[in-house]
Image (tube, rainbow, N blue to C red):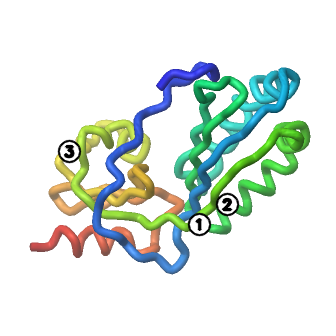
Amino acid sequence: MDCACGHHHAPTADPSGTPLAMANPPIALHGRLICADMAQLMTALELLPDHVAASRAEPGCLRFDIAQSDDPMVWTLSEVFADSAAFAAHQARTAASPWGKRSQALTRDFHRHEAQPRIRPATQADAASLSALLPAGTTPLPALIAHVEGVAVAHLSPSGVATIHPALQNRGIAEALQDHAAP
């Protein structure tokens, strides 16, 4: 969807699949950021672009989407981090940032939870997420993927080559994909 922040936000991908248990699962945060007045809205409009860019650049960030809702004073957000340590690092960076220091008066209505990766065949709806994960020139379909709340974090090609998000490597995902693909 297009929003007042000037970005196109991709539709949510297929959330289905076989659950993959992890000892240290990804952390997801969903909710709303609410501006009480025009001054708060102007603060959000001024600072959010840099905050979003810095958040997306964090090594443990799997997804960081924020968009204005139909009510321009309300922003919806969806964040996914590799694990609780990555989420804690995000919170520490945020607290020290201009966004963290100047947006404290905005109302935050967030829900934090552990997110379980899931394994399923890739679909065309995964194309954008896969393009961020795979090396240039890699054909994303057909494939088996692991995703966290619709964000592709691992890809298993028909030839058996696995590509895993750097923040989730060595955590059993490649093996789980290969086991799932075995006849």
Residue 99 locus on image (x, y percent) = 82, 38
| Secondary structure of residue under mark 1 | loop
Mark 2 to mark 1 CA distance (whole Å): 6 Å
Q: Is residue 42 above or below residue 86?
A: above
| Crowd band around label 3 with a 10 angstrom C-alpha radius: few (<14), some (14–19), many (20+) | some
Q: Kindly identify which numbered label has been placed on residue 95.
A: none
| Extreme residue in the left direction | 183
**Which numbered disc, 2 or 3, marks the residue closer to the eye?**
2
Given contact means CB atoms under 8 Å apart, are the residues at marks 2 and 1 in contact? Answer: yes
Q: Is residue 174 above or below residue 140?
A: below
User: Hey, what amino acid is under mark 2?
Assistant: Phe
Mark 3 to mark 1 CA distance (whole Å): 28 Å
User: Hey, what amino acid is under mark 3?
Assistant: Leu
Q: Kindly identify which numbered label has been placed on residue 83.
A: 1
| Secondary structure of residue under mark 3 | loop
Q: Quadrant of residue 165?
A: bottom left
* Near-viewer residue (116 or 41): 41
- Image-based side of 123 in relation to 49, left or right: left
| Secondary structure of residue under mark 2 | helix
Q: In this view, does 159 lie above or below 134?
A: below
Residue occupying image coordinates x 67% and y 44%: 55
Q: Kindly identify which numbered label has been placed on residue 141.
A: 3
- Image-based side of 103 in relation to 86, left or right: right
Residue occupying image coordinates x 29% and y 37%: 137
Residue occupying image coordinates x 37% and y 72%: 20
Residue 25 locus on image (x, y percent) = 52, 71
User: Hey, what amino acid is under mark 1?
Assistant: Asp
* Near-viewer residue (144 or 1): 1
Q: Name the residue under label 2.
A: 87
Given contact means CB atoms under 8 Å apart, are the residues at marks 3 and 1 in contact? Answer: no
